[in-house]
């Protein structure tokens, strides 16, 4: 019977060993590549300014009927309370000036008055902007938290995903090559 009192200790040591090994196994960062190569999820978001009646929906990402290729889309998930969103805002403003590129926004779990004040103060780079008040649509996009940015081809396929603030380096090394790839689809 004395061996029975050792069973919990042996089991605990085995679990510690198992968890220790799991810490050192290399795993790819699936979060950064989630959704790349897949179709953008179906969604319909209300407008930040309800009086405009124009929110943001999956259909906005698709090529206009009759055109062989529509514009490439940038989808940016942001919030007024997000520090890195302030940092990346000038990059979004610059991207919004480019011909053949549409910039869409998903305002993530934000207060509408705070989001409007953010855009009033810094400028609005978004061709369309939807409010994801409860974060449900953002979950469908695989968002872990703002800011996150996607490059979407005119057929609705996600070409690239970037987690974190857009910087000039990120735009040149990640976003622009993805835009060019999306244009060739």
Image: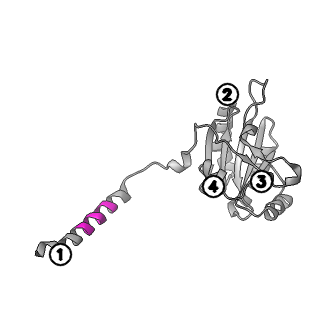
Q: Residue under label 1, please give it.
A: 5
* Above or below, 69 relative to 13: above
Disc with the residue nearer the chain's start (4 vs 3): 3
Q: Determine whether, in the image, residue 6 is placed left or right of residue 99.
A: left
Q: Residue 184 carries which label?
A: 2
Cα gap from disc 4 to disc 1, whole angstroms: 51 Å
Expressed as whole percent of the image width and height from the top left, the position of residue 42 reads 66, 41
Res 90 label = 3
Most extreme residue toward the front, as rendered? 1
Element type at mark 1: helix
Give the total number of marks visible in the rendering: 4
Q: Do the residues labelled 3 and 1 touch (CB within 8 Å)?
A: no
Q: Does the magenta stretch include residue 147?
A: no
**Disc nearer the start of the sequence (4/1):** 1
Front: mark 2 or 1: 1
Asked if the residue at tag 1 contacts the one at tag 2, i.e. Cβ–Cβ closer than 8 Å, the answer is no
């Amino acid at each position: 019977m004395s061996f029975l009192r050792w069973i919990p200790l042996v089991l605990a040591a085995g679990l510690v060993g198992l968890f220790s090994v799991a810490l050192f196994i290399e795993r790819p960062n699936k979060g950064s590549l989630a959704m790349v190569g897949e179709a953008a999820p179906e969604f319909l978001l209300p407008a930040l300014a309800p009086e405009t009646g124009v929110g943001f929906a999956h259909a906005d990402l698709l090529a206009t009927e009759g055109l062989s290729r529509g514009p490439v889309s940038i989808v940016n998930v942001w919030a007024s309370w997000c520090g890195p969103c302030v940092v990346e805002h000038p990059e979004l403003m610059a991207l919004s000036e480019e011909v053949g590129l549409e910039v869409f926004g998903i305002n993530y779990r934000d207060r509408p008055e705070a989001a409007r004040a953010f855009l009033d103060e810094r400028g609005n780079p978004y061709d369309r902007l939807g409010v994801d008040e409860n974060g449900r649509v953002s979950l469908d996009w695989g968002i872990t938290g703002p800011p996150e940015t996607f490059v979407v081809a005119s057929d609705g396929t996600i070409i690239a995903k970037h987690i974190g603030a857009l910087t000039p380096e990120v735009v040149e090394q990640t976003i622009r090559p993805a835009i060019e790839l999306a244009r060739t689809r």
